[in-house]
Image (cartoon, rainbow, N blue to C red):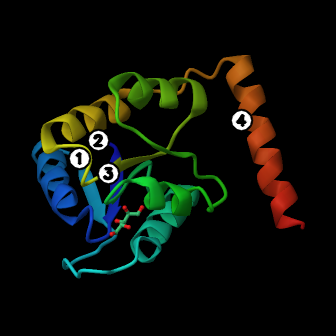
Amino acid sequence: MMHIGIAADHGGFELKRQLIEALETAGYEVTDFGAHDRVAGDDYPDWVVPLARAVARGEIVRGLAICGSGVGACVAANKVAGVRAALITDGFSAHQGVEDDDMNVMCLGGRVTGQALAWDLVRTFLSARFKGDERFRRRLAKVAALEREKRSE
Ligand code: RB5
């Protein structure tokens, strides 16, 4: 079973709790990067960045990052080189984002996407595999080159 990491601020706290329960019931190994208590006004980078770094280091195969809208979580996760995060609200993007773009962190809005749809999107994301076609690799190589450029700025 795939090793999954999950992180959320106060806006995604309840959805994170529900998804952990569903993931563990389904047999996934889940690492919870926090928040471990619901603290109103906590900051999504404090939880999402450690998750993103673990994905980038290969310790976690796929990550789930949640805030109120999913936007802040996505912005923060994508600052970590090697992370390909996207805010997902529909089933097509949940699998196509992996198949074509090798998305490794899926972001959700805890105040936007309800529990049933979120769980459906998570299952779709986790079942999808990168197709690896030449054109997909070529595009991702251009993204990786940007990350290297940024490091040497
Ligand atoms: C918190 O109120 C909210 O700003 C945060 O959870 C997230 O939605 C940011 O994008």
Question: 130 and 116: which one is in front?
Answer: 116
Closer-to-camera residue (78/63): 78
Horizontal side of 7 relative to 36 (left or right) equals right
- How far separated are the C-alphas under marks 4 and 2? 26 Å
Instruction: Give above or below for 118 relative to 79.
Output: above
Q: Which residue is mark 2?
A: 1
The C terminus lies in which quarter of the figure?
A: bottom right
Question: In this view of the protein, which residue sits in the foreground, 94 or 62?
Answer: 94
Quadrant of the image containing the N terminus? top left
Local packing at callout 3 (Cα closer than 10 Å; few below 14, some 14-19, many 20+) is: many
- Residue pointed to by mark 4: 140
| Disc nearer the start of the sequence (4/1) | 1
**Residue 24 percent location from the top left of the image:** 15, 50
Q: Is residue 97 left or right of residue 132?
A: left
**Residue 33 in which image quadrant:** bottom left
Q: Residue 91 location in percent, x, y?
A: 33, 25
The disc labelled 4 sits on which kind of residue?
Leu
- Distance between mark 4 and mark 1 Cα atoms: 28 Å
Label 3 near ligand 1 (CB < 8 Å): yes
Decide if ligand 1 comes within 8 Å of the CB at mark 1.
Answer: no
Amino acid at circle 1: Tyr
Give the labeled residue for mark 1: 28
Assess whether mark 1 and mark 2 are in contact (beta carbons under 8 angstroms): yes
Per the rendering, the mark at residue 109 is 3
Give the distance between the C-alpha atoms of the residues marked 3 and 2, in whole angstroms: 25 Å
